[in-house]
């Protein structure tokens, strides 16, 4: 029988790092749902769609074929057959994803894809609405969070490590804006499911959080 672990939380809380490590340890498939919303965001950006216009966004959804694939232990994201794994990682694509993920047609398309993946195999799925909407009967639900300052600091260090320009204040404002958009949208806003376990990782290292989630999974 397939098992499901849902990890939700705000941008930059470390969901993907933890989800990936837990999936590798348990032999489950890691599903990064944010990457799917980013791929749709990138598609709309490339098509020059006015994202304030929901009808225009809806009209461009059928032409976006989003797929996830595991290659050499790495998750790849494909948009209409093109590998966009790196292209979706810009702040712009993240903001576009945050904005367009508020539209019901965008969510319907991706939620159904996510549920199909989880029906076939054991998954660790991360996102914003996994425990509340996508996998309401998940075996384990985690709500991962950290302070805005700490999340901005992690993102800042990540960019610096890659040799990229980084402005701490701008990153913090961007994260706060994304938090607001994600928690205040009408459909499936980011919120902790009633039966989710809250983990504040502000003062916790990756290994400590991973070990905690694995212990919780094993106790289920
Ligand atoms: O996790 P991320 O930063 O890659 O996600 C990008 C955006 O996609 C995020 O700001 C909100 C949206 N998203 C969502 O609405 N639901 C999900 N399950 C995952 C992401």
Image (cartoon, helix red, strand yellow):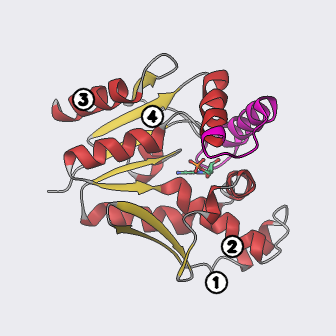
Find the distance from the CA under tag 3 to the CA under tag 4: 16 Å
The residue range painted magenta reads 160-189
Front label number (4 vs 2)? 2
Disc 3 marks which residue? 216
> Dots 1 and 2: beta carbons under 8 Å?
yes
Look at the image and tell me whether residue 2 can be seen: yes
Give the side of residue 70 with respect to residue 193, left or right.
Answer: left
Q: Residue at x 21, y 28 (%)?
A: 215
Magenta segment main secondary structure: helix
Q: Is residue 211 above or below residue 185?
A: above
Give residue 63's mark.
1
Task: Identify the residue at image location x=39%, y=33%.
Answer: 142
The CA distance from mark 4 to mark 2 is 30 Å
Q: Residue 217 or 136: which is nearer the viewer?
A: 217
Label 4 CB-ligand 1 distance < 8 A: no
On screen, residue 90 versus residue 118, left or right, reads: right
Question: Which mark, by number, is residue 193?
Answer: 4
To which residue does mark 2 refer?
43
The quadrant of the rendering that contains the N terminus is bottom left
Q: Position of residue 177 (x, y in %)?
A: 76, 37
Viewer-side label of 1, 2: 2
Q: Is residue 71 magenta?
A: no
Rounded to the nearest whole Å, what is the CA distance between mark 3 and mark 1? 40 Å
Classify residue 17 by image quadrant: top left
């Amino acid at each position: 029988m397939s098992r499901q672990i849902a990890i939700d939380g705000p941008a930059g809380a470390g969901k993907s790092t933890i989800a990936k490590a837990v999936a590798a340890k348990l032999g489950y498939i890691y599903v990064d749902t944010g990457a799917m919303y980013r791929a749709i965001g990138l598609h709309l950006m490339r098509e020059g769609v006015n994202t304030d216009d929901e009808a225009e966004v809806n009209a461009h959804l059928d032409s976006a074929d989003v797929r996830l694939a595991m290659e050499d232990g790495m998750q790849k994201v494909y948009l209409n057959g093109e590998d966009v794994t790196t292209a979706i990682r810009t702040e712009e694509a993240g903001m576009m994803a945050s904005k367009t993920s508020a539209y019901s047609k965008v969510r319907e398309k991706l939620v159904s894809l996510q549920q199909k993946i989880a029906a076939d195999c054991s998954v660790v799925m991360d996102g914003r609405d996994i425990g509340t909407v996508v996998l309401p009967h998940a075996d384990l639900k985690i709500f991962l969070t950290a302070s805005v300052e700490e999340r901005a600091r992690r993102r800042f260090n990540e960019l610096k490590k890659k040799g990229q320009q980084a402005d701490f204040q701008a990153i913090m404002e961007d994260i706060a804006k994304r938090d607001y958009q994600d928690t205040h949208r009408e459909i499936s806003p980011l919120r902790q499911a009633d039966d989710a376990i809250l983990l504040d990782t502000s003062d916790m290292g990756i290994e400590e959080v991973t070990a905690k989630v694995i212990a919780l999974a094993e106790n289920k």
